[in-house]
Amino acid sequence: MKREIKTGSNTSMGFDDEKIRTFESVDAWRAEGERLFGKDVKKWKYKCPMCGHVAAVQDFIDAGLDGQEAANSAYCECIGRYTGKGSPKKGDSSGCNWAGYGLFGIPHGGVVVMTGEGSGQHIFEFAEE
Ligand SMILES: [Zn+2]
């Protein structure tokens, strides 16, 4: 089904929930994270939609972020932003400078998490083991 959601005070996006996996609440998304990786958020892993690099929240902590920042960055930023990587390059999954909240959003892949009535965020998908 085609849907339109608000992603910020002045931004919105359209998507097809048959093409992009959609969690109907933050709780539903959290439950999936716990199912895959357990309760310790530092162990949660996400896949960059641009270069395919998989990074855990712990990797962001190791790169210098504090725990809260790391938990909030890992689902919308490629670790490459903190390890000096540039634009995504074909065939290089070692990290890039992509951020899902940037001008170009997430052009393919990712998941949508509904955060309220008619609003949500398009974020990186979990990296399934
Ligand atoms: Zn990347």
Image (cartoon, rainbow, N blue to C red):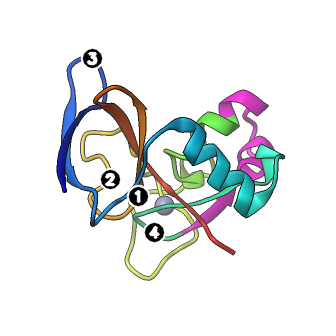
Q: Which mark is residue 9?
A: 3
Looking at mark 1, is its residue's CB closer than 8 Å to ligand 1?
Answer: no
Q: Nearer the viewer, mark 1 or mark 2?
A: 1
Q: Which segment is the magenta one?
A: 53-69
Amino acid type of the residue tagged 1 in the rendering: Gly
User: In screen coordinates, is 57 left or right of 111?
Assistant: right
Q: Give the image location of residue 93, x and y in percent.
A: 53, 74
Point out the residue furthest to the top here: 9
Given residues 129 and 81, the one toward you in this image is 129
Neighbourhood count class around disc 2 (C-alpha, 10 Å): few under 14, some 14–19, many 20 upward: many
Callout 4, which amino acid?
Cys
In the rendered structure, which disc, 1 or 4, sits on the residue that comes first in sequence? 4
Residue 85 lies, in percent from the top left, at 52, 57
Q: CA distance from mark 3 to mark 2?
A: 19 Å
Position of residue 10 in the picture relative to residue 129 (left or right): left
Residue 110 shows which numbered tag? Answer: 1
Q: Quadrant of the N terminus?
A: bottom left
Instruction: Examine the rendered structure and indicate whether residue 21 appears above or below residue 119.
Output: below
* Mark 3 to mark 4 CA distance (whole Å): 29 Å
Residue 58 on image: x %, y %: 79, 49
Name the element at disc 1. loop
Residue 66 seen in the figure? no
What is the x, y in percent for residue 84?
57, 51
